[in-house]
Amino acid sequence: MTLATSKIGEEVRLVEVQGGRQIRKRLADLGLNLGMTVRVVHGLSYGPIIVAVKDSRLAIGRGMAEHIIVEKI
């Protein structure tokens, strides 16, 4: 499943990024790496996905979130 299809409140682990070098670099710049656990804070059927990572919250665009493969924990 992708980060874009995750439900609010779910904790998921980042498994794979389907995309090119730019999307991988952008995620690394945000501090998101494969194997990390994040919690979906906000993710309606439109707009950005907001995830909690450690003590921070990050907004990820829906288009980018569709390229991030996750698994439920």
Image: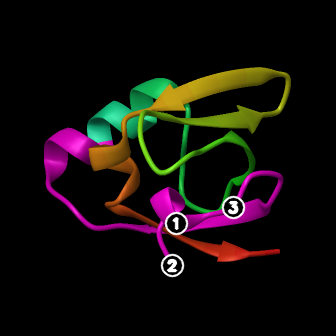
29 in relation to 21, above or below: above
Image marks 3 and 1: residues in contact by CB distance under 8 Å = no
In percent of width and height, residue 29 lies at: 41, 26
- Per the rendered image, the range of residues in magenta is 1-24
Q: How many marks?
A: 3
Left or right: 33 with respect to 25? right
Badge 1 is on which residue? 5
- Mark 1 to mark 2 CA distance (whole Å): 7 Å
**Residue type (three-letter) at the residue carrying disc 2:** Met
Foreground residue among 47 and 36: 47
In percent of width and height, residue 26 lies at: 32, 32
Residue 16: name its quadrant: bottom left
Residue appearing at x 83%, y 74% in the figure: 73
24 in relation to 70, above or below: above
Left or right: 29 with respect to 31? left
**Residue type (three-letter) at the residue carrying disc 3:** Lys
Image marks 1 and 2: residues in contact by CB distance under 8 Å = yes
Badge 2 is on which residue? 1
25 in relation to 29, above or below: below
Chain-order first, disc 3 or disc 2: 2
Q: Any magenta on residue 10?
A: yes
Badge 3 is on which residue? 7
In percent of width and height, residue 49 lies at: 53, 39
- Mark 3 to mark 2 CA distance (whole Å): 11 Å
